[in-house]
Image (cartoon, grey):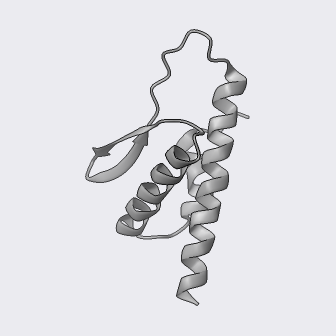
């Protein structure tokens, strides 16, 4: 599709302030790990909490990576919707 992960992530981050985006990323990391979808790690980059994917298995396919990113987007939308519902 040509989208970068940053561009795709903006879909559920929207206009949230940095601290809220960090909270969403923390929740996203926990849920993707708890569901056994992938085991990303995290780091701080330019003062922001970010997810980091290390892909080192030679058997990993593009389809595998697409599935992980689709799951991240789905869970990100879920977390964002839950957050929005609490604010209403």
Residue 39 shown left or right of residue 7 in the figure: left
Q: Residue at x 39, y 47 (%)?
A: 50
Could you tell me residue 76's position as x and y percent? 59, 57
Residue 45 shown left or right of residue 61 in the figure: left
Residue 74 shown left or right of residue 25 in the figure: right
Q: Nearer the viewer, residue 14 or 54?
A: 54
Number of on-image labels: 0
Would you place residue 44 above or below residue 65 in this image? below
Would you place residue 26 above or below residue 60 in this image? below
| Extreme residue in the top direction | 58
Quarter that holds the N terminus: top right
Q: Nearer the viewer, residue 42 or 2?
A: 42
Q: Residue at x 66, y 45 (%)?
A: 71
Quarter that holds the C terminus: bottom right
Q: Residue at x 59, y 47 (%)?
A: 35
Could you tell me residue 67's position as x and y percent? 69, 35
Q: Residue at x 60, y 39 (%)?
A: 37
The image quadrant of residue 75 is bottom right
Would you place residue 41 above or below residue 8 in this image? above
Would you place residue 24 above or below residue 40 in this image? below
Could you tell me residue 59's position as x and y percent? 62, 11
Could you tell me residue 56's position as x and y percent? 48, 16
């Amino acid at each position: 599709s040509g989208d970068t992960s940053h561009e795709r992530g903006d879909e559920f981050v929207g206009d949230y302030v940095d601290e809220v985006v960090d909270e969403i990323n923390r929740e996203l990391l926990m849920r993707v790990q708890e569901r056994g979808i992938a085991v990303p790690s995290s780091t701080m980059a330019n003062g922001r909490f970010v997810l980091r994917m290390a892909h080192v298995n030679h058997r990993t396919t593009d389809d595998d990576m697409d599935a992980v990113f689709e799951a991240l987007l789905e869970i990100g939308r879920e977390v964002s919707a839950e957050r929005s519902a609490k604010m209403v």
